[in-house]
Amino acid sequence: MAQETVDLAGKLAQFSAYWSPKIVAAYNGNDVLVVKVKGEFVWHSHPDTDDFFLILKGRLTIRMRDGDVVLGPGELYVVPKGVEHCPMAEEETHLLLIEPAGTPNTGDPTTAAVKAEI
């Protein structure tokens, strides 16, 4: 069975809202998402899963209580489960995220962004 390719730049061109992840593919119970970010997100943690960040464009700082991680295009970082962190970007930054389907982006389903498939 042939699979469709996913044009990440094309998917990112379909929306402008920041901190609003969009599902672009799925595999083995995981969502593959793209998101545009700018400014500071909320401090949060994920008690049951790691948090995967791959930078496609721009720069991202992941603030953590014991020090910051700064990432540029082509770099990735995995925040271990349970570690409180706060992503922030001074300029518009494009990310690829991989996480178990249904994982709330704030760690709390009541405050999480709704993830739409595009």
Image (cartoon, helix red, strand yellow):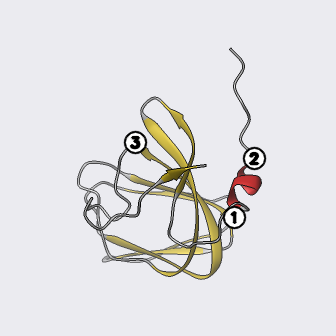
Reading the chain from its start, which is encountered first: label 1 or label 2? Answer: 2
Which image quadrant is residue 82 in? Answer: bottom left
Marks 3 and 1 close (CB-CB < 8 Å): no
Check disc 3 and give the amino acid type: Ala
Instruction: Give the numbered dot on residue 7.
Output: 2
Q: Nearer the viewer, mark 3 or mark 1?
A: 3
Q: Which residue is mark 3?
A: 101
The answer to which image quadrant residue 41 occupies is: bottom left
Return the residue nearer the eye: 116 or 99.
116
Q: Residue 8 vs residue 108: left or right?
A: right
Q: Are marks 2 and 3 in contact (CB under 8 Å)?
A: no
Helix, strand, or loop for circle 1? loop
Label 2 residue SS: loop
Residue at 42% in and 33% down: 29
The reply, left or right, for residue 48 in relation to residue 103 is left
The numbered mark, 3 or 1, whose residue comes first in the sequence reads: 1
Whether residue 16 is situated above or below residue 95 in the rendered picture: below
Disc 2 to disc 3, C-alpha distance: 21 Å
Q: Position of residue 111 (x, y in %)?
A: 29, 68
Say left or right for 101 vs 6: left
- Residue depicted at 46% across the width and 55% down the height: 115
- Residue 78, relative to residue 24: is it above or below? below
Judging by the rendered image, the residue that carries numbered circle 1 is 73
Q: Between disc 2 and disc 3, whose residue precedes?
A: 2
* Element type at mark 3: loop
Name the front one of labels 1 and 2: 2
Name the image quarter holding the N terminus. top right
